[in-house]
């Protein structure tokens, strides 16, 4: 079921995909900035793993909210000052697909 929801979510983000240049910047952010806490391979560190298996059962909407607003009381910062909701959706799609290779 989650796969169907994720596929629908990914399909819904296609119209608002960032430009190729911005995608490159977001990919860098994901691997370097997110990776600084979640591990450079996103398999966990200070923060939890961000692999498709680790994210199974979490809705794209919840993941977008965490990215944009952070998690109060934890080291997870809000990224809303730096990225748009559409860019957060793009990052969520990459995480759920596992398509964030170095």
Image (cartoon, grey):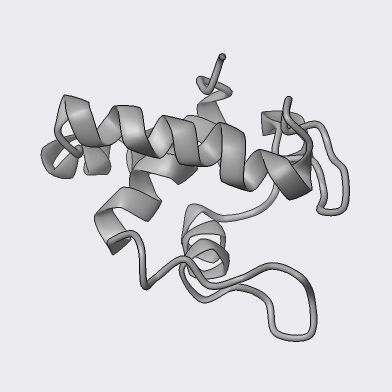
Residue 43, given in percent of the width and then of the height, sits at 81, 31
Picture residue at 59% right of the left edge, 46% below the top: 33
Q: How many marks?
A: 0
The extreme bottom residue here reads: 73
Picture residue at 67% right of the left edge, 31% below the top: 52
Q: Quadrant of residue 22?
A: top left
28 or 53: which is nearer to us?
28
Left or right placement of residue 74 versus residue 80 in this view: right
Picture residue at 56% right of the left edge, 15% below the top: 101
Q: Is residue 8 visible?
A: yes
Residue 9, given in percent of the width and then of the height, sits at 36, 44
Q: Is residue 6 visible?
A: no
Asked if 74 appears above or below 12 in the picture, the reply is below
Asked if 98 appears above or below 30 in the picture, the reply is above
Q: Quadrant of residue 31?
A: top right
34 or 85: which is nearer to us?
34
Point out the image quarter for the N terminus: top right
Point out the image quarter for the C terminus: top right
Left or right placement of residue 22 versus residue 31 in this view: left
The extreme right residue here reads: 45
Asked if 90 appears above or below 88 in the picture, the reply is above
Residue 15, given in percent of the width and then of the height, sits at 12, 39
Picture residue at 36% right of the left edge, 63% below the top: 82
Left or right placement of residue 47 versus residue 101 in this view: right
Left or right placement of residue 37 versus residue 80 in this view: right
Residue 47, given in percent of the width and then of the height, sits at 81, 53
């Amino acid at each position: 079921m989650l796969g169907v929801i994720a596929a629908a979510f990914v399909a819904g983000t296609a119209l608002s995909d960032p430009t190729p240049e911005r995608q490159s910047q977001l990919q860098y952010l994901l691997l370097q900035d997110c990776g600084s806490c979640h591990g450079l391979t996103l398999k966990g560190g200070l923060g939890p793993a961000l692999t498709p298996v680790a994210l199974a059962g979490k809705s794209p909407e919840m993941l977008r909210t965490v990215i944009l607003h952070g998690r109060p009381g934890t080291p997870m910062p809000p990224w809303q000052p730096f990225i748009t909701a559409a860019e957060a959706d793009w990052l969520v799609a990459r995480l759920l697909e596992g398509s964030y290779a170095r």
